[in-house]
Image (spheres, rainbow, N blue to C red):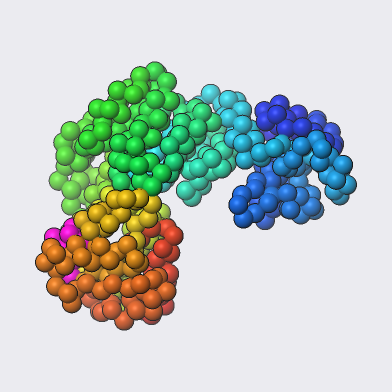
Amino acid sequence: MKRVTTRAVLDATGAILVRGDDARALEGFSTDTRSLREGELFIALSGPNFDGNRFARAALEGGAGALLLRGTEADAAELVHLPGNAPIAVHPDPRRALGDLAAWHRSLFDVPVIGITGSCGKTTVKNVVADLLATRMPVVSSPSSFNNDVGVPHTLLLGDETTKLFVVEMGTNQRGEIAALARIARPTAGVITNIGASHLEGLGSLDGVAQEKGDLAAALPRDGFLVLNADCRWMPELSARTPAQIITFSTDGEGDLDARDIVFHAGGTTFRLNGHEVTSPLLGTHNVQNLLAALCVCQGLGVPLDDVLPAVGGLRGGSHRLERVELEGVTLFDDAYNSNPDSSRAAVRFLSGMHGFARRVLVLGDMLELGDLAAELHHALGVEAARGKIDLLVLVGELTRATAAGALEAGMPESAVVHLESTDTAVAAVPDLVADGDLVLVKGSRRMALERIVTALRESRGGA
């Protein structure tokens, strides 16, 4: 965060000072006393299972420069007795205050802000954009998958006097969230990676997903740009919602940046792109699309392909995102970070395209937040796995019973389909199902915690 005073925080958020000097300079911000540094503003967030105010004393003992706590002026009498003399302010909703502070802080910067959303791939695109451009300019990007009404403000507040570019991931599972995040971040450009069947419990349908993601398009200025997948059926509707320039990518020959002749190999993925031969260590057609989206951002910012393509070879995939792990006798792809129908189909296609192994083993967990379409979408994934010639399909969770039914109906032998009730059961069972020479891919929704299966395989086979 740029160095600001307590008064600036009060003005930005509407918080009320109940103790201390409003001229106190602050060295940053924190919402977690475990990572709080001396001189930082501590913002006491609260939720269903935690109360940030309970950590006020710990924040002061940790050297906080000021506190922003949940409360009103009526709480002043008890708050002034906290130790030390650091300023203390109160606000009825510190979470909203965090967003207001971030919006004010973002207004201090006259630099590009790239907002990235989509049903899948947004974290990878965000990471690739940041990695490709970090050698050319100081870049601030969302840590990990900080993409909600706490994560986006965190990202914006990381900017300082040197920052020349923000890359902000924007997630959603309820209508109106993208618009709210856009009001905080005020993106100058955007990326919508794709529209797929994710978070249908909150968004209702694919049309609802498109409407919600399209709110990013609607938030962009006329002199900005929007990156879209030319192969997405909602591209015309998304394009119509923005006055910004449209830049497209494709793996089917329809975009401004087109990947042709895609080949997977031990070193990653190679393809032709606008007269260049590109080799990326990121695997899968979906990661070619993610890379193309990032390259479109570079072009939109005026950075030529020739300047950034040399950095592609140094890219690294995110943790638990099709991460290759070599075990004793087995090659494992850890894709356990998250799952939805589109990303799971991509995993099936990727595994189907891999050759030279004794068996292709797919471990799939439940895909969550799909609402009334959950059974239908899980069933379709089983059909896809059968058609993809998967040799062993291991399914984890109640919803994947429909995946098993789909695979069997599409002709997969019963001996090739194993259903396990829970992640606990799978952790114990999967190591014994895997044999030397197998290629194994593990994928499931975040709450399924299938990375525990990856850990079990590492332990049983001596992985690094």
Q: Is residue 136 visible?
A: no
**Quick one: quadrant of the N terminus?**
top right
Start and end of the magenta stretch? 382-391
- Which x, y percent locates residue 347? 26, 57
Residue found 28% across the figure and 77% down from its top: 434
Residue found 43% across the figure and 37% down from its top: 175
Q: Is residue 389 magenta?
A: yes
Q: Is 454 left or right of 246, judged from the image as shown?
A: right
Q: Is 318 left or right of 88, judged from the image as shown?
A: left
Q: Residue furthest front?
A: 372
Q: Quadrant of residue 72?
A: top right
Residue found 70% across the figure and 37% down from its top: 92
Q: Residue furthest left?
A: 411
Which residue is nearer to you in this view: 261 or 383? 383
- Which x, y percent locates residue 415? 18, 77
Q: Quadrant of residue 328?
A: bottom left
- Which x, y percent locates residue 244? 36, 21
From the image, give the main secondary structure of the stretch colored magenta. helix
Q: Compared to 387, does 421 lie above or below? A: below
Q: Is residue 373 magenta?
A: no
**Quick one: quadrant of the C terminus?**
bottom left
Q: Quadrant of residue 50?
A: bottom right
Residue found 53% across the figure and 23% down from its top: 110
Q: Is residue 72 visible?
A: yes
* Figure disc tally: 0
